[in-house]
Amino acid sequence: MTNAIKLAIFLVLAYGAVPLALGGNPYVIGLIVASLTIGGISVAWALLGNLGGMVSFGHAAFFGVGAYVSALLTMRAGWPVFPAMLAAGVGAAIASVATMPALRLRGPYFALAILAYAEIFRILATELKSVTGGAAGLLSIPRLPMVLGIDFGSKLGGYFVILTIVLLAMTGYQLIRRSPYGLALKAMHDSEDATKVVGVNSTMLKAWMLMVSAFITGVVGAFNAHYINFLEPDYAFAGLWTTLAIVSAIFGGYRTVTGPLLGAVVVYLVDQLLFKAILPQGHQIVLGVLLGAMILFSPGGLMPLLVAKFTRKEASHAA
Amino acid sequence: MIDLIAQSLFSGLLSGAYYALIALGLALVFGTMRVINLAHGELVLLGAYVSYTAEERLGLDPLASLPLALMVVIAANMVVYYLISLIKKDRELNSLILTFGIGVILTNAMLMIWSADIHSATTPWYHDAVILFDTLFAMQAELVFAGAGVVLVGAVWWWLEKTWYGRALRAVASNRDAAKLMGVDPRLTEILSFAVAGLLATVSGLALYTAKVIQPSLGHNLTVKAFIITVLAGIGSVPGVLLGAVLLGVVESLTVTIASSALQELAGMVLFLVVLLLMPSGLFGRAKRRG
Amino acid sequence: MLLELDGITVAFGGLVAVSNVSFTMAEGDVLGLVGPNGAGKTTLFNAVSGLVRPTQGRARLLGRDLIAMPIHARARAGIGRAFQVPQPLHELTVRENLIVASRFATGRIDNERIDEILDLLKLGHKAEAEASTALALTEQKALEVAKALATNPKLLMLDEVLAGLETAGKRAFMHTLDAVRARYGLALLIIEHDIETITRLCQRVIVLNFGKLIAEGTPEHVFNDSEVIRSYTGGEAA
């Protein structure tokens, strides 16, 4: 099967079969929307990790900034929702500029410096009461609008919006990966000096990846704000957004473009439908187990592991 | 106002000594293995919960539960070490994600066992007030554990600088292969550093339980504080950990007194970023962390 | 002047690897850099291409101060560098190696030039092979030169690109370098141990010993200098 056919089948399923089959079940559609939201952060996280070689523990920072920018633009400045969501991405990208001094830091220091930024943003959102409403949060954030007779404010409408956002993010990711920028970033992992010597400004490239990753995360955060119509700092900047995104990306394979999304859907749905039912309190223990197990037994993610198993079997059959 | 500031400085010093206990365990493991154990705060909390259970169920004084808490926490830290040692590739970053996962496991396990309720020691002695120089107020528990903090930091410093084990540990930290050639078993010294980190975490846990309050979700915050202090200290400086911890304690305490308690965490984070970005080797350290 | 080095000194702690070295190169010059192991030749290359920062001294390319520039900016300014131990860009094909070099050093992907370089260096048949795993030693060395050429350099610095090749390979590679020079007219700065190779390729030679420049001149002149011979043989002969 060629990739084009696979893609066509996927699109028909995602835009046709899934809504037809599950559209009548708001609970399940709600879960899928939440899993796609996490998928969006996860794709952005993996883009930074795979292309930029940087592990972030603070993507909640960009998620929260995006959510607040879009909510405030629509509520205080009267912007329409969709342009405000784009502006939220820009806002998150600008916020990422504030984190750029951290790019000079090595792996673990960068990861935790970004976490510090997330904390700072959360505290600022709590303290700047006149702008953000403080700890009480923002109520009745405008819902997604009705366009051409389609009500994007419904659960199913939200599904189409977040699905499109995530697929566009993945397309962008793939385009970057294929471009000379992607090639240079790939080469930087193992041959940093050699890459610089042929003219690559590695710090600048990493900075761009951080901005792209923040942009995507910000748009996803904005979507979520308009989807649930409510924000408070502890929710918008919750560490859980980062945790779920990391688990999804590691589980699905953060070196692939599709892995993080698949990981998010599987991890979130299994967590909510299965483990939450078995363990009402502390079901996230499963996320920790999953994360640890993946790092120890298949750091490349589950999908590459399955693919490798499958091809090995095929090879041994052929032999 | 002067009284308030004096009290604030004093409280900051006391918290600093307690923070040093938490941070030193993290810094020790980081110094030996270049691994940041993101589950360290959860281990502190685990020690606190063992002490809580011993007090609640067996009527044991928190200090008397120390041996039991030590066994549990050190055993848990051995498991952490074992899991980290299974990582073959890219240990610096993969161990970060692994221990992050272990932290999530521990937090949720504690939530399942002990629920989300807030607890603190019920033995009144610990909460009794002491007045020093007519003006400075402290709880007995704070004084005890601040003292323990200073003594243990001193002991660890002496151990690293003056004993053969300590030298072996430092040799492994600076060059694993060379240490092997000198007949030092790196695994043994790494296990040792995890055991000592477990000990420090346990004592911090008792301090947390007797002087403050405990709740399953606190662990992450403790880890972050410990990491902030490690950064302030710079790698490889034990006295730096104490000074960094006191600096953080005092800055937090002054922020609360002068501004508001809501900004306490912000002060720590800003201090962390400023030092991280502007001072490549920390306030007192030797090694660099840029690359 | 194309390249002007003025009093370049590189010290690592107490160890002075390069000490007060000055020389100039005009456009199109071919200059040999010789000296025993540890004389500071590669360190001097690193100082020019930006991998180490000189403790003292100035370096200019066409009048522009190099020392203030980061590594990538020097590549864009016209410094091309081939490493002694080949450093292909990992996980990329041979062609992708050149694409990255062309795109980032010159601002656009010059496919014509890339094809021409692949041809000149006889890498055409390996263009789609993975650079870090699928090349023989000669091809790896050729890729080092090809990558540097793709950056459109004014000065090409070759760090022992002929070392490790057998005689026939060496001769073939020298012909390739002649062709490269004939085609692009660029200046070459060459580190090489083999006196015969240097004599064949270079108009001018400078000799480093213990980080100091101890002789400069035509190959015939320099290789008859007794101090040079002593430095080469460890002071036993002559």
Image: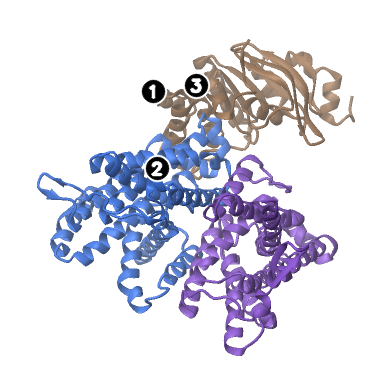
Chain colours: A blue, B purple, C brown
Question: Quadrant location of residue C17?
Answer: top right
- Alpha carbon distance from label 3 to label 1: 13 Å
Q: Which amino acid, by three-letter code, is at mark 1?
A: Glu
Seen as rendered, the residue at the extreme left is A149
Numbered disc in front, either 2 or 1: 2
Q: List x then y, in percent, for residue C42.
A: 69, 31
Q: List x then y, in percent, for residue C185.
A: 53, 14
The disc numbered 2 marks a residue on which chain? A
C172 is higher (above) or lower (below) than B251:
above
Which quadrant does the C terminus of chain C fall into?
A: top right
The label on residue C152 is 3
**Under tag 3, what secondary structure?**
loop
Pointer 1: what residue? C112
Pointer 2: what residue? A92
Numbered disc in front, either 2 or 3: 2
**Under tag 1, what secondary structure?**
helix
Q: Which amino acid, by three-letter code, is at mark 2?
A: Ala
| Mark 3 neighbour class, 10 Å CA radius: few under 14, some 14 to 19, many 20 or more | many
Q: Is residue B257 left or right of residue A242?
A: right
The disc numbered 1 marks a residue on which chain? C
Q: Which amino acid, by three-letter code, is at mark 3?
A: Asn
